[in-house]
Image: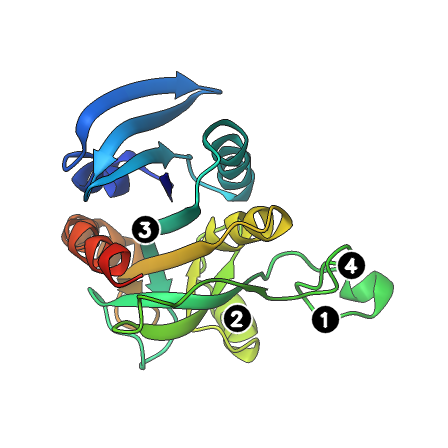
Amino acid sequence: MISFIAAMDREALPLAEKMKKKQIIKENKKTFYRGEIFGKEAVIAVSGIGKVNAALTAQIIINKYSPDYMINFGAVGGLDGSISALSYYCVHESCQYDFDLSDVDDVERGYIQDYDKVFFPSEIKGAEFLQKVRLATADKFTHKTRDVKTVLKMGCKICDMEGAAISQVCFSSSLPLYIIKGVSDVYGSGIQYEQFRNNLNCVVKGFPDIIEKIIKNK
């Protein structure tokens, strides 16, 4: 069993359209597509936007479907000139940059005591054809200069609102996780929200081919 998780229907549908013997299941106000894809039994979940939605959905998948591994995919923002719009990346580490206890405990931004970590690892085997990056996750659209500087200082080149939360859940359950992201907008290259709206449909169309290649290479 392979599990997939995306934040929005628009991100999930190009992959769900390739699913055979498809069932649509509603649970905890989330949508799950269950069937076969690329010759494998699979479930595709639409979590909704944000870290709580993402973590809740990831845990439902783990509890109900007991997958062999999970793939989180979706659109992200790029934060410097080394990142290109409409390109795809494999995340090898991710953090929650809005989780900040530094003023209280004198620890690094993103540090989570229960795990003694700032960054959670994710899988790259089978996705070596994609460039590796670090991902920063927060419950906000990262476009202000102050936030971008913070994330770049942490060594992250892309940002989203779900990935690191899913990574923490999967790490807690010892479940292998791939995080595959397509860039819809880049800081400093125009108005980010307009880039996001203009590029999202193009970005999401590329995920099925990339995911199929990863599954075959794994």
Q: Are marks 3 and 2 in contact (CB under 8 Å)?
A: no
What residue is pinned by disc 4?
113
Amino acid at dot 1: Glu
Question: Compared with residue 177, is residue 1 higher up or lower down, i.e. above or below?
Answer: above
Q: Residue at x 64, y 49 (%)?
A: 172
Q: Residue at x 48, y 70 (%)?
A: 148
Closer to the camera in the image, 102 or 92: 92
User: Residue 156: which numbered mark, if any?
Assistant: none
Secondary element under disc 3, as helix, strand or loop, is strand
What is the C-alpha distance between the residues marked 2 and 4?
A: 20 Å
Secondary element under disc 2, as helix, strand or loop, is helix
Q: Are marks 4 and 3 in contact (CB under 8 Å)?
A: no
What is the C-alpha distance between the residues marked 3 and 2?
A: 19 Å
What is the C-alpha distance between the residues marked 1 and 2?
A: 12 Å
Say left or right for 101 vs 71: right
Amino acid at dot 3: Gly
What residue is pinned by disc 3?
74
Question: Compared with residue 104, is residue 55 higher up or lower down, i.e. above or below?
Answer: above
Chain-order first, disc 1 or disc 2: 1
Chain-order first, disc 3 or disc 2: 3
What is the C-alpha distance between the residues marked 1 and 3?
A: 27 Å
Q: Residue at x 31, y 73 (%)?
A: 128
What residue is pinned by disc 2?
151
Q: Quadrant of residue 103?
A: bottom right
Say left or right for 183 vs 140: left
User: Residue 108: which numbered mark, if any?
Assistant: 1
Chain-order first, disc 4 or disc 3: 3
Chain-order first, disc 1 or disc 3: 3
Amino acid at dot 2: Val
Q: Are marks 1 and 4 in contact (CB under 8 Å)?
A: no
